[in-house]
Image (cartoon, rainbow, N blue to C red):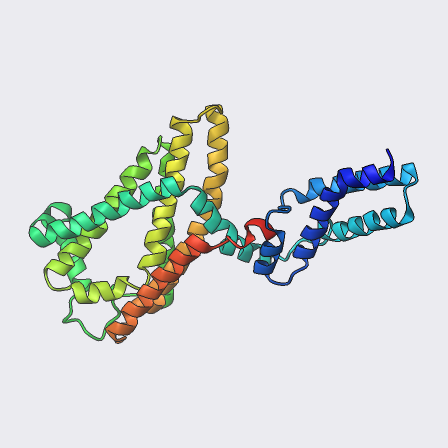
Amino acid sequence: MKQDAFVAAHQSDWSALDAWLIARSQPKAKDRSFDAEGLLSDVDFPAAYRRVCHHLALAERRGYSTLLIDYLRELIQRGHQVLYRPSAPRWHRIALFLGAEFPRLVRSQWRVMAVSAALLFVPFLLTIGLIQWRPDLAQSLFEPAQLAQFENMYDPANSGRRLGRTEGTDVKMFGYYIMNNVSIGFRTFASGLVAGVGSVLVLVSNGIIMGGVAGHLTAIGYGGPFWRFVVGHSAPELLAIVIAGGAGLQLGMAILAPGRRTRGRALVEAGVIGARLALGVFAMLVFAAFVEAFWSSIEWMPDPVKFSVGGLLWLFILLWLVRGGREHAHGG
């Protein structure tokens, strides 16, 4: 093949790799994604690099011009520096996972996430509403001793004490909340192995129980301290449970409807996705426990501050889940 024909046949590959390497060198992720848009993705890079290596070998064997060979060598040298550079520090990989990969994974499973959210929030809101209409329904959900405990924790007359607790230091309660939250999250996720039915039952029952507590305390006039306590950590905690439920439901779907895959293969793939989702859920639940232990329990904080912080956390976490990782979709 003559050099002109060789160049014409492969110029598009070289230009795409060149553009990707230029975009990759941009310091900001948004610049990298913009420059690389529509040219070459990170996933395609290794194959593109190998093709250009093959083109260089052909050019040298066929005795093409020094100018062309030097151009291909320079491309390969730049690609080599990207392909074989040292791996990123662990903290960087953690930040990349939480900032981009995890929210992108949640969005990729949006159908089961939407179902999970409905299974938690619909019973939650319905139970609150029903107890405002029929306060005696709380007696059907809880034992008298449990109701007395809830009332003692959020009695407006008990001023000067930490909200939402009767004893324990902040650090001690931080550990307790981590264990409790992670237990709920793991149970919600793992119970999906029972054909998804387990996750459905855990989500619905949690929605009813949380709605029962909130509805009862609101109905008897103790809603002020209760809502001031829960508003701060409600976003990371409830959304983490929703994601854990969605991860459990996709496990169940792999068992019930594996499609063209074998049931075992589908379950393994769903398990990998679920495990990665569980890592993000764990981080959210630890954050929720931190807020619950060190912020939510502060009794003297004015209501506008408490509710503003709670609202901002809902906004930031939803934005993170909806927008996180979009700028890395092409540029890496």
Identified at 87% across, 36% down, the residue is 2
Q: Quadrant of the N terminus?
A: top right
Q: Is residue 97 rendered to the left or right of residue 42?
A: left
In the image, residue 277 sits, relative to residue 266, either above or below, namely below
Residue 328 image position (x, y, % from top left): 55, 53
In which quadrant of the rendered view does residue 12 lie? top right
Residue 56 image position (x, y, % from top left): 83, 42
Q: Is residue 267 rendered to the left or right of residue 113?
A: right
Q: Is residue 234 rendered to the left or right of residue 226?
A: right
Identified at 17% across, 58% down, the residue is 149
Is residue 297 something that shows in the picture?
A: no
Q: Nearer the viewer, residue 126 or 44?
A: 44
Residue 230 image position (x, y, % from top left): 27, 61
In which quadrant of the rendered view does residue 250 lie? top left
Q: Nearer the viewer, residue 175 or 302?
A: 302
Identified at 37% across, 51% down, the residue is 240
Q: Across the whole image, how many numbered discs are drawn on residues?
A: 0
Is residue 36 something that shows in the picture?
A: yes
Identified at 34% across, 47% down, the residue is 242
Residue 289 image position (x, y, % from top left): 37, 60
Residue found farthest to the right = 63
Q: Is residue 223 rendered to the left or right of residue 240?
A: left
